[in-house]
Image (cartoon, rainbow, N blue to C red):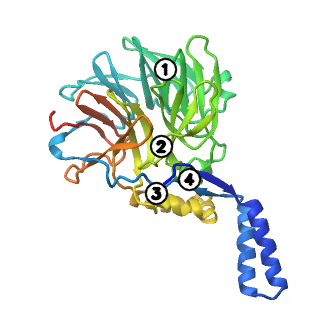
Amino acid sequence: SSGINAEWPLRPGSTAACLLALLLYWTKTNFLTSTVICLLAALFYWTGTKFIFLPCPADISNIPNLCLTRDLVTDIPGVPGGASLVRYKGDVVTGTQDGYLVGINPDNAEVKWKIKCPTRESGGPCRILGLRVVGEFLYGVDLFGRLFKFQSGEFQWLLDSKFPEIAKLNPGFFNDLVIHEDVAYITDSFTLRDDKKHQNLFQRFYSFEADGKIIAYNLVSGEAWVFADNLHIPTGIELHRNNTVLLVSESNMYRISELDLKTGKKMGVFSKTGTLGAVGGVRRSEKEGYWVAVSAGRTSRFHVSDLLAVFPVLRYLVTEYQKFYPLLGYLSKRCVEEPRFYKVGEEGHVTTVVSVSEEVPEVSRASSEILETGNVVFVGAPSSKSIFRASLTGEH
């Protein structure tokens, strides 16, 4: 059940396999067997893919499981695609997929205000995914490589992927951020490619490429740099309570990694006993531990990810050719499992699992971020028409 992941390149191994196949052929051991081995080895060499060893899902057989029934859940309509959630000046604030900042009353879960995010000259809509509060300011990142500061109804753009000093860092899709000592650490999920073939989400998820990074931006000096790279679709990011480690979700590797806050070097895996799916946002609990969102559950050992991880040729075919993309989407949806989110302790061990009853079908199966406030949590759902509030104690 180790949370350590490993990647083995195939080229040296495939070369050895091909030599073995030739040896079998020369010694007349078995023509059919040797031919098949040689063809597979040649295919492995041609694709240049890797074996991926994913961690086993966390064992939750003895972990408390809170099932949210209808009386514990309040659906909050009118907030489509609300991904990130923060407390800002007394309200719960999120960003919608149609480009609005939305303020919600935490007591009755009603929308209080909406402010449109201005469209940038660089083009494209504003899709807010990550939010943080520092003092009187609300900071946020949007999907298209931009960072803004918000106060008193006004947006100020601090960072844009089209700025020359930022473009040289080859930014892709910004997902989340955390701010520490005037530096914003931003998860850049994966590098953009010129070819359209590599822009499909399923293709990038199941190719297991390590082309994600963390971009650091100094809010005072305006300096930006790559803080860490070679990450697998980094989505959520949080500062550990010890203030020396960044916790980074590597979504498609089903792990939360620890990065040294001074050097950006990967120190190890925080989720040492495994996770419960493709990890989304990681946020501190008000009391202790961390809330972990799950964009796609994986509680059984065998999952479409496990299949593609250990069969690299199959992975190559279904991720390189567009006609297989619908198959990836179908398999992904069929393999989604509970839970919706869970809580881990300071050492990364799962302590609480939260699922949602089938009697609440309007609640999204995927979560992106959890905001705890008192005895309730607000749950972000980027692919849903609403977010929801849930009681953890049976009282609203």
Q: Position of residue 315 (x, y in %)?
A: 59, 61
User: Of residues 391 and 145, which is closer to you in this image?
Assistant: 391
Circle 3 residue: 329
* Circle 2: element type: loop
Label 3 near label 1: C-beta < 8 Å?
no
Residue 98, position as x, y percentages in the image: 39, 33
Residue tagged 4: 203
Q: CA distance from mark 2 to mark 4?
A: 25 Å
Q: Amino acid at mark 4?
A: Gln
Mark toward the start of the polypeptide (3 vs 2)? 2
Left or right of 136? Residue 388 is left
Q: Amino acid at mark 3?
A: Gly
**Residue at screen point 29% across, 33% down:** 378
Point out the frontmost of discs 3 and 2.
2
- Nearer the N terminus, badge 4 or badge 1? 1
Label 3 – label 2 distance at C-alpha: 27 Å
Residue annotated with mark 1? 148
